[in-house]
Image (tube, grey):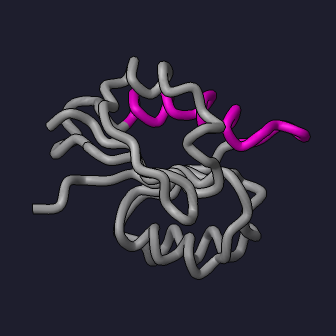
């Protein structure tokens, strides 16, 4: 069984990749990554939520992950949302860009680097 996932996209990627992820899982992404029209279409057609957030000029991808992951986790662990997510898919930041202690504090216990970023897994 596939455990529920949430994607956190913090740096530029293709609209096609964002759309693909948005059709597989909830997506949190920087509002500057796609146009308003593309975002509206994605929100209208995706079975999952697409949440946007702002990024300050010069903010590094790892800092964005560190800043946003707490809000993302709180939102996706609220009751009555079931099943709770178990995997965080980060696109646009490397694992060594993010303090692992902040992820461990949220219950993540295993981490895998990927070509597009990394995966963080909660204890099941």
Seen from this angle, which residue lies furthest left? 1
* Percent of width and height locating residue 65: 60, 37
Position of the C terminus, as image quadrant, is: top left
Asked where in the image residue 73 lies, by quadrant, the reply is top left
Question: Which residue is found at the position 65% from the left and 37% from the top?
Answer: 97
The rendered magenta stretch, by its main secondary structure, is classed as helix
Instruction: Work out which residue is located at the far right of the displayed protein and give it.
Output: 57
Task: Please determine whether, in this image, residue 28 is positioned above or below residue 66.
Answer: below
Q: Is residue 118 left or right of residue 78?
A: right
**Between 60 and 39, the one nearer to me in the picture:** 60
Residue 123, quarter of picture? top left
Q: Position of residue 51 (x, y in %)?
A: 54, 50
Which residue sits at x=63%, y=68%?
39
Between 80 and 58, the residue placed more toward the observer is 58
* Location of the N terminus (image quadrant): bottom left
Residue farthest to the bottom, as pictured: 16
How many labels sit on residues? 0
Which residue is depicted at the point 56% across and 70% down? Answer: 18
Q: Is residue 25 left or right of residue 62?
A: left
User: What residue is rendered at 39% in x and 27% in y?
Assistant: 74
- What segment is highlighted magenta in the picture? 54-75
Q: Is residue 60 magenta?
A: yes
Image side of residue 95 versus residue 11, left or right:
left
- Residue 119 rendering spot, x and y as whole percentages: 42, 50
Work out whether 74 lies above or below 22: above
Magenta region includes residue 107: no
61 vs 114: above or below: above
């Amino acid at each position: 069984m596939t455990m529920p996932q949430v994607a956190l996209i913090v740096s530029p990627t293709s609209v096609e990749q964002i759309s693909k992820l948005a059709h597989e899982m909830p997506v949190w992404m920087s509002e500057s990554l796609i146009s308003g029209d593309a975002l509206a279409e994605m929100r209208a057609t995706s079975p999952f939520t697409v949440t946007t957030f702002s990024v300050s000029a010069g903010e590094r991808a790892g800092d964005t992950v560190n800043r946003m992951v707490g809000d993302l986790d709180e939102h996706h662990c609220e009751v009555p949302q079931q099943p709770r997510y178990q995997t965080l898919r980060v696109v646009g930041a490397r694992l060594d860009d993010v303090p692992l202690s902040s992820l461990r504090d949220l219950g993540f216990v295993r981490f895998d680097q990927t070509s597009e970023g990394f995966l963080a897994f909660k204890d099941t």
